[in-house]
Image (cartoon, helix red, strand yellow):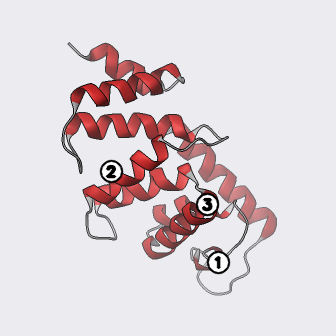
Amino acid sequence: MRYALVVFCLLLACRAAHGTEETGNELSYEHFVHSDKPIKCLYGYAAEKVGDHDAAIAIFEDCIARWESVYSMIWLAQIYDSGIGVPQDLEKAAALLKRGAHTQDEAGYTSLAKYHYGMILIEGRGVAADKQAGINWLQRAADEGVDEAREYLASMP
C-alpha cells in the first residue's frame, strides 16, 4: 500500500509539473501508451485506478516489452487476477508473477513479485498448489525485506 501511495503522489506531481499533451478528458492516460519514457509505467497504475483499464493494460504491456518492468508485471497480474476491466485470467496472472519473481530490477519490485508468486503457489491460484515452493518464494521475499512475507511465514503453523 505504501508503494501505491508514493506512486500516486509522484504521478500527481508529474502531471501538475508537466501538464498533459491531450485535450478533453483530464483523466485519460491514452497518450502515455506510446511514450518511450519509462515513467509511463507509473501512469499505468493511475490509469487503472481511475478505471481506464484499456490504457493501463496497454501501458503495462508496453513497459514489460520495452523494459522488462517488474512493477508493470505485478500490476498487470493484479488486473488479470481480479478480472476488473478484463476477463479474469488466473493463469496469465500467475505467469506474470512468476516472470517478475525471476526478473531482477533495480527498483526492488522483484521482491514484491516473489511475495505475490509465493502466495499464489500456496493458494493454487492459476497454478497447481505447491505449498513448499510457495514457502520458499516467501522466504526469499522475506530475506529481501518484504514485511508481509515475513509476517505470513511467522503466522504459519
Give 112 or 49, whichever is nearer the viewer: 112
Choose top left, top right, bottom left or bottom right for residue 140.
Answer: top left
Which secondary structure, mark 3? helix
Report which residue position mark 3 lands on: 41
Q: What residue type is labelled 2?
A: Ala
Q: Measuring 41% from the left and 26% from the top, which residue is drawn there?
A: 148
Give 123 or 136, whichever is nearer the viewer: 136
User: Where does residue 74 sit, x and y in percent of width and height?
Assistant: 46, 50
Report how far apart the C-alphas of labels 2 and 3 lie in the structure.
20 Å
Q: Which amino acid does label 1 sit on?
A: His
Answer above or below: position of 60 versus 2: below
Report how far apart the C-alphas of labels 1 and 3 lie in the structure.
11 Å
User: Where does residue 83 sit, x and y in percent of width and height?
Assistant: 28, 63
Q: Measuring 30% from the left and 30% from the top, which residue is drawn there?
A: 134
Tell me: 44 left or right of 39. left
Q: Residue 94 carries which label?
A: 2
Choose top left, top right, bottom left or bottom right for residue 106.
Answer: top right
Report which residue position mark 1 lands on: 34
Count residues near mark 1 (Cα–Cα under 10 Å), then give few for <14, some for 14-19, many for 20+.
few
Answer above or below: position of 6 versus 78: above
Q: Measuring 59% from the left and 41% from the top, which residue is drawn there?
A: 104
User: CB atoms at circles 2 and 3 under 8 Å apart?
Assistant: no
User: Where does residue 61 sit, x and y in percent of width and height?
Assistant: 51, 67
Q: Measuring 54% from the left and 24% from the top, which residue is drawn there?
A: 144
Choose top left, top right, bottom left or bottom right for residue 15.
Answer: bottom right
